[in-house]
Image: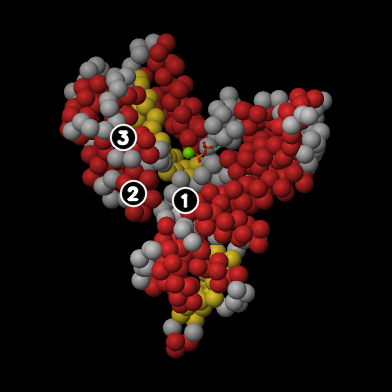
């Protein structure tokens, strides 16, 4: 007898019109050839960087905007075009791109500099050498000739959390220690508050030029999706409401093109799985639910242990149908649970902070209410459906020993 897996694979091959023509082009890592609605930003960045082609040092640039507004795409694109022109001529420009959020490449100062050495063509072991030695290698690789090196530090805000402001301060002043090479830094952030927490000295040297990436509106998102649809989907499989719906949902949040693309791709995958021949608005609704579900489960999995214990205790109370759950109730339950799990309990104050963090992640809803002269407390509820709550509980039980 055929097994189930074979049937699924056979069906998959037999399906007459495949939904996807090229699934990859709907992935958020795919780099499209054309970038609609970012002409201003592209022109602006290109004009700032152009002097490098004649050996001049471009200003440092600070790029900011919400997630999914095309910052990474545009910076990489302009960087590539710049290198292309340079390679045809004087070969004077080199662009190095680092995503500072990546643990492997930018977790410590050492790793970041080692990664830059690697991008300049020399492997440095990822641990073990004295940091000064790695710096020396970096300076040697950088300064061995007259050229302009543009270093793109994407998601630079995560660097500041991991390293001191001094690091960035020194980094933006690297030219003082170079004789031949000239370095410009492009810092990119999704975090609009980042500028406020930055050391003012770093801020002024990093943001010699600033470029803002505003959110896309629904019509702009539709254009972006249409362009990808041509590459990604078989012609005619999308019903008319699909693109406007994905665009509208993503625009409601904050004009995030990644979110719009994810909705479109997942809607297609769901249609494919149910052996549909079309992608419909219903598939987009289902995609929305699935993406939010996956996101919440992922964020629960990556919570620190103490937060997991707090969340677990909250769920315990919710399941007892207690309706007015307050911080103190959660704390009592949490203390009990800590005993059972062999965890040393935090103070009520810390637990209260963890509850606010869980609220920010959208897992629970903790509304502050005033108790008049008795001060303030939080009334805690779940902000997810029962199905999601059960799954969260399941995930927590797997990782906490309960
Ligand atoms: N104007 C655009 N045209 C085509 N695709 C875009 C555009 N802006 C963003 N995207 C796509 O949306 C996703 C998110 O863009 P990205 O540059 O990573 O955003 P950010 O770095 O601002 O968070 C990527 O898949 C990117 O290719
Ligand atoms: Mg980005």
Disc 2 and disc 1 in contact, CB within 8 angstroms: no
**Cα–Cα span, label 2 and label 3:** 14 Å
Percent position (x, y) of residue 148? 31, 23
Residue 221 is at least partly visible in this image: no
**Classed neighbour count for the residue bearing mark 3: other residues with Cα under 10 Å, few (<14), some (14–19), many (≥20):** many
Q: Residues within 10 Å of mark 1 (few under 14, many from 20)?
A: few
Q: Is residue 267 left or right of residue 259?
A: right
Relative to 33, is 68 above or below? below
Which residue occupies the foreground of this view, 229 or 40?
229
Q: Quadrant of the N terminus?
A: top right
Q: How many angstroms separate mark 3 from mark 1 (CA)?
A: 24 Å
Choose between 50 and 97: the one closer to the eye: 97
Asked which colour scheme the image uses, the reply is secondary structure
Tell me the element at label 3: helix
Mark 3 and mark 1 in contact? Answer it, CB < 8 Å: no
- Determine the secondary structure under disc 1: loop
- Residue matched to label 3: 112
The image quarter containing residue 113 is top left
The quarter of the displayed image where residue 278 is located: top right
Q: Earlier in the sequence, mark 2 or mark 3?
A: 3
Mark linked to residue 236: none
Q: Residue at x 67, y 40 (%)?
A: 266
Task: Report the Cα–Cα distance between label 2 and label 1.
Answer: 18 Å
Q: Would you name the residue on which mark 1 appears?
A: 302
Q: Indicate which disc residue 161 carries.
A: 2
Residue 166 percent across, percent down from the top left: 23, 45
Q: Image check: 80 left or right of 121?
A: right
Point out the residue furthest to the front here: 1
Residue at horizontal 54 percent and vertical 54 percent from the top: 395
Residue extending farthest to the bottom is 373
For residue 129, say whether it is visible. Answer: yes
């Amino acid at each position: 007898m055929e097994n189930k897996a074979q049937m699924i694979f056979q069906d998959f091959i037999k399906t007459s019109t495949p939904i996807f023509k090229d699934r990859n082009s709907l992935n958020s890592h795919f780099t499209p050839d054309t970038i609609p609605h970012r002409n201003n930003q592209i022109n602006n960045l290109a004009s700032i960087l152009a002097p490098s082609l004649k050996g001049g040092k471009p200003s440092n640039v600070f790029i900011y905007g919400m997630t999914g507004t095309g910052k990474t795409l545009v910076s990489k694109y302009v960087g590539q075009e710049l290198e292309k022109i340079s390679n045809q001529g004087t070969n004077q420009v080199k662009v190095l791109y680092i995503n500072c959020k990546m643990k492997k490449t930018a977790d410590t100062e050492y790793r970041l500099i080692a990664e830059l050495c690697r991008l300049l063509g020399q492997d440095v072991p990822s641990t073990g050498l004295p940091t000064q030695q790695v710096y020396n290698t970096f300076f040697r690789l950088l300064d061995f000739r007259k050229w302009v090196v543009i270093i793109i530090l994407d998601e630079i805000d995560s660097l500041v959390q991991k390293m001191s402001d001094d690091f960035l301060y020194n980094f933006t002043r690297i030219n003082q220690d170079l004789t031949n090479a000239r370095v410009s830094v492009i810092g990119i952030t999704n975090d609009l508050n980042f500028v406020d927490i930055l050391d003012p000295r770093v801020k002024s040297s990093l943001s010699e030029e600033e470029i803002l990436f505003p959110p896309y509106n629904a019509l702009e998102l539709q254009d972006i999706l249409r362009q990808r649809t041509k590459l990604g989907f078989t012609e005619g499989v999308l019903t008319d409401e699909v693109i406007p719906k994905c665009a509208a949902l993503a625009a409601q949040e904050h004009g995030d093109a990644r979110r719009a693309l994810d909705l479109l791709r997942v809607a297609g995958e769901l249609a494919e799985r149910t052996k549909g021949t079309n992608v419909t608005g219903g598939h987009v609704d289902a995609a929305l639910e699935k993406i939010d579900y996956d996101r919440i489960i992922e964020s629960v999995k990556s919570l620190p242990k103490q937060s997991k214990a707090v969340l677990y205790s909250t769920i315990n109370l919710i399941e007892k149908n207690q309706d007015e759950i307050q911080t103190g109730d959660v704390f009592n339950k949490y203390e009990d649970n800590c005993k059972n799990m062999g965890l040393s309990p935090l103070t009520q104050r810390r637990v209260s902070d963890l509850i606010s963090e869980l609220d920010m992640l959208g897992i629970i809803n903790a509304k502050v209410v005033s108790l008049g002269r008795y001060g303030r407390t939080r009334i805690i509820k779940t902000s997810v459906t029962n199905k999601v709550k059960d799954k969260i509980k399941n995930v927590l039980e797997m990782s906490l020993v309960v």
